[in-house]
């Protein structure tokens, strides 16, 4: 039986996204993790065994300050990938988010491509996923579909505008306020790879979700993906649009954000996790890099990669003299001239 056009789109997203990572064709937007240098802690006065990598958020204790971010689901192929990611999450003790479940609300048969995540990770922390325009009834259905512990509501104006069949109207705030007030689980507002400026953080703070996922650039670039899959090709080009994860975290500081932050976008090592925590993130997550690793090396290879992050993280924290992840935000660092310029300009913008 042939699958729907929306299911086919899921497969296209998967294929194009993985190829961009494999071919290293993702355009670098703004400041990267390399624009931040750590200052040496010559006398940490601690042992690796002293490090506690646990993070408490949403009333839950996460063993590690990173998780497998939302990627896929909705077709036979992407459902299989969801199952593999969930099996890896179960083996490595990580939380996991699924991709947008909107297709399963329209096509009930697609629900199993998301439910497999709960089947393979029965006791894990799972995050459901829908667009910001979905009403509370749909939100409850998505949560129930995978017995989710939290839900991401993604905001993706740039992706929709580049997508030939995408939305062209974006009135989200009233609906988000209703969903946040009525959701049975914590709500995360999440960008999908274009980052957030100060104005976004100020607007979201008034909504008071459980957390903000900054979803910065330099991870999977959905503007590039949608432009490549458009038929006929369109000239609308937003490949260089947005703020990076590093810039978004600094923008949150400029906006005096007081909500928990999750850093996503281009995180490809334990070092990137540490730098994100230094810039104020409570949790971090990785999608495209882990997906590329899974598709190249299989479940065993992805488990090995994640375990290397879990081995490296306590060592890196010891290097910086941090026994707890929350201590990293107070550690000194140096910014490149480009990043320092960004900070100065954003400070002026808030005056």
Image (cartoon, rainbow, N blue to C red):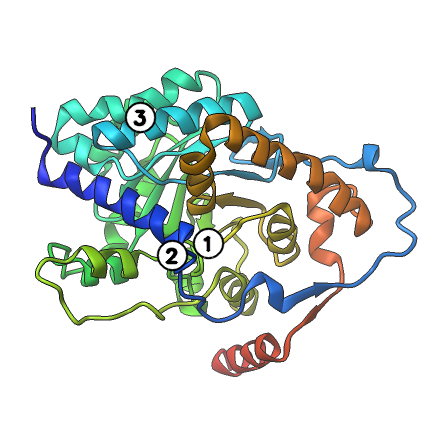
Of labels 3 and 1, earlier in sequence is 3
Q: State the image quarter where residue 118 is shown.
A: top left
Judged left or right of residue 51, residue 2 is left
**Where is residue 80 shown, x and y percent of the image?**
31, 26
Mark 3 residue element: helix
Of labels 1 and 2, earlier in sequence is 2
User: Do labels 1 and 2 touch, CB within 8 Å?
Assistant: yes
Judged left or right of residue 314, residue 280 is left
**Where is residue 81 shown, x and y percent of the image?**
34, 30
Residue at position x 78%, y 37% in the image:
51
Quadrant of the snapshot with the N terminus? top left
Q: Which of the numbered marks, if any, corresponds to residue 265?
A: 1
Q: State the image quarter where residue 347 is shown.
A: bottom right
Mark 1 residue element: loop
Residue at position x 40%, y 25% in the image:
84
Of labels 3 and 2, earlier in sequence is 3
- Residue located beneath label 2 in the image: 193
């Amino acid at each position: 039986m042939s699958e729907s056009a929306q299911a086919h789109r899921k497969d296209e997203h998967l294929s194009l996204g993985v190829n961009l990572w494999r071919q290293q064709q993702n355009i670098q937007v703004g400041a990267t993790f390399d624009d931040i240098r750590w200052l040496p802690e010559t006398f940490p006065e601690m042992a690796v065994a002293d490090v506690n990598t646990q993070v408490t958020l949403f009333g839950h204790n996460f063993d590690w300050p990173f998780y497998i971010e939302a990627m896929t689901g909705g077709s036979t192929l992407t459902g299989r990938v969801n199952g593999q990611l969930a099996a890896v999450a179960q083996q490595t003790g990580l939380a996991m988010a699924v991709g947008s479940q909107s297709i399963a609300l329209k096509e009930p048969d697609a629900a199993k491509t998301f439910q497999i995540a709960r089947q393979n990770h029965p006791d894990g922390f799972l995050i459901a996923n829908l667009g910001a325009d979905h009403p509370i009834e749909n939100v409850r259905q998505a949560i129930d579909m995978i017995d989710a512990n939290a839900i991401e509501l993604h905001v993706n104006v740039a992706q929709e505008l580049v997508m030939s069949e995408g939305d062209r109207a974006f009135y989200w705030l009233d609906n988000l306020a209703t969903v946040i007030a009525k959701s049975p689980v914590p709500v995360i507002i999440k960008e999908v790879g274009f980052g957030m400026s100060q104005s976004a953080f100020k607007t979201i703070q008034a909504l008071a979700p459980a957390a903000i996922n900054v979803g910065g650039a330099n991870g999977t670039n959905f503007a590039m993906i949608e432009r490549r899959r458009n038929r006929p090709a369109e000239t609308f080009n937003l490949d260089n649009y947005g703020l990076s994860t590093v810039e978004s975290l600094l923008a949150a500081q400029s906006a005096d954000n007081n909500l928990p932050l999750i850093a996503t976008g281009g995180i490809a090592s334990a070092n990137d996790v540490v730098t994100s925590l230094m810039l104020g993130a409570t949790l971090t997550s990785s999608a495209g890099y882990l997906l590329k690793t899974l598709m190249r090396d299989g479940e065993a290879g992805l488990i090995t990669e994640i375990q290397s992050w879990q081995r490296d993280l306590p060592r890196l924290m010891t290097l910086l003299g941090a026994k707890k992840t929350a201590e990293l935000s107070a550690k000194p660092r140096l910014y490149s001239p480009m990043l320092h310029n960004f900070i100065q300009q954003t400070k002026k913008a808030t005056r």
